[in-house]
Image (cartoon, rainbow, N blue to C red):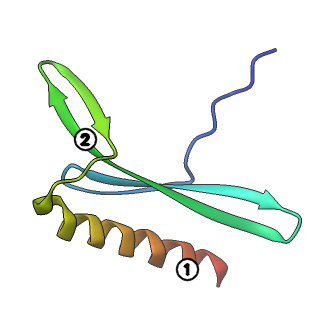
Amino acid sequence: MSKAKQQPVHEVRLGAIKAAIWENETNVGTRHNVTVCRLYKDGEQWKQTESFGRDDLPLLAKVVDLAHTWIFQQAG
């Protein structure tokens, strides 16, 4: 029997920058992890990378801040 692929509990996206928030149950309660990527189109195919250029950094900071806010809102 194959295991279903885990999905993020929430995503934050601004332009091409996306943060996926993952929920993990531990013996001390729920914990969250965040992965970030930049989306781009290569011909007709959408791809993603974990590499960010200088001009991506301000938007990356905003996306990560929004992910941080979402995680804190879940606790209260």
The residue shown at (56%, 80%) is: 72
Q: Residue 40 carries which label?
A: none
Tell me if residue 44 comes above or below residue 25 in the rendering: above
Residue 23 in the image, given as x and y percentages of width and height: 65, 57
The residue under label 2 is: 39
Q: How crowded is mark 1: few (under 14 residues within 10 Å), some or many (20 or more)?
A: few
The residue shown at (20%, 65%) is: 57
- Outermost residue, bottom direction? 76
Q: In which quarter of the image is the N terminus?
A: top right
Q: What element carries label 2?
A: strand
- Outermost residue, right direction? 27
Give whichever of 50, 13 is nearer the camera.
Answer: 50
Q: What element carries label 1?
A: helix
What's the residue type where badge 1 is placed? Gln
CA distance for labels 1 and 2: 26 Å
The residue under label 1 is: 73
Residue 76 in the image, given as x and y percentages of width and height: 64, 85
Q: In this view, does 67 lie to the left or right of 18?
A: right
Asked where in the image residue 2 lies, by quadrant, the reply is: top right
What's the residue type where badge 2 is placed? Leu
The residue shown at (27%, 64%) is: 60
- Outermost residue, top direction? 1
Q: Which of marks 1 and 2 is nearer the N terminus?
A: 2
Residue 37 in the image, given as x and y percentages of width and height: 34, 48
> How many numbered dots are placed on residues in this image?
2
Q: Is residue 63 left or right of residue 30?
A: left
Q: How crowded is mark 2: few (under 14 residues within 10 Å), some or many (20 or more)?
A: some
Q: Does the CB distance between marks 1 and 2 fall below 8 Å?
A: no
Residue 40 in the image, given as x and y percentages of width and height: 19, 36
Give whichever of 53, 74 is nearer the camera.
Answer: 53
